Structures are given as structure tokens and as C-alpha cells.
Image (tube, rainbow, N blue to C red):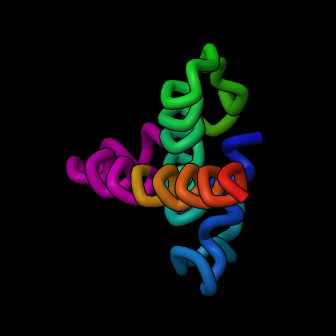
Amino acid sequence: MFHELTHWTAHKSRLDRPIKNKRGSKAYAFEELIAEISASFICCHLGFEYSKQHSSYIKDWLKVLKEDKKAIFRASSKAQKATEFILGNVQIEASK
């Protein structure tokens, strides 16, 4: 659920990440990496046990990470922004 919610943050009216990428492309793999990292951040923040559910993407992630040594830092930064966006909106809603 948190993985998919992270994709939701990519919309232009939210964090404006391009997500119209073909499965198997580097851009697609990068967005999937962002979503998975963010899901793990959210689980950790909320005290849930994190269980990776997207093992089919690992091969594509490895390709991206091998070709770009800074990709993990860029993906983590974008995942952190998505996490903060999601948790910020959850806290706003919870306080109403």
C-alpha cells in the first residue's frame, strides 16, 4: 500500500516526478526504487514490519544502480520527499 501511495505523490500537483515510463526502462526502475525505499521509510516511521513485495524489480534496480553510482542517493532523496509528503498529509488529516 505504501509503495503505491508513493507513486501517487509523483503527480504534477504533488511532487511532480515523471512516471509515464515503459516497464523495463531505467526511468521505470528508478521510480520503482523510489517507491520501495519510501515504503520502507514509512513502515519504519509507523513501527510496521517492512516486507519487500516487489522482488520482480530487483534486476532492473541493479541495472540502474550499476550504471549510476549516485542513483541510490537520488532515489533516497526523492523517497524521503515522498515520505514527508505522505506523512505530512496523514498528520494533517488525523488532526482534523
Which portion, as a residue range, is magenta? 58-79
Horizontally, residue 81 falls left or right of residue 59, namely left
Horizontally, residue 80 falls left or right of residue 6, namely left
Displayed quadrant of residue 36 = top right
Magenta segment includes 24:
no
Displayed quadrant of residue 93 = bottom right
Eyeballing the image, is 89 above or below 56?
A: below
Magenta segment includes 63:
yes
Residue furthest toward the left? 69
Horizontally, residue 79 falls left or right of residue 48, namely left
Q: Nearer the viewer, residue 16 or 68?
A: 16
Which quadrant, please, contains the N terminus?
top right
Q: Residue at x 57, y 19 (%)?
A: 47
Eyeballing the image, is 81 above or below 34?
A: below
Q: Where is residue 48 drawn, in percent x and y?
A: 63, 19
Which quadrant, please, contains the C terminus?
bottom right
Q: Residue at x 62, y 14 (%)?
A: 49
Query: Is residue 24 among what the camera can see?
Result: no
Q: Where is residue 9 drawn, in percent x and y?
A: 62, 66
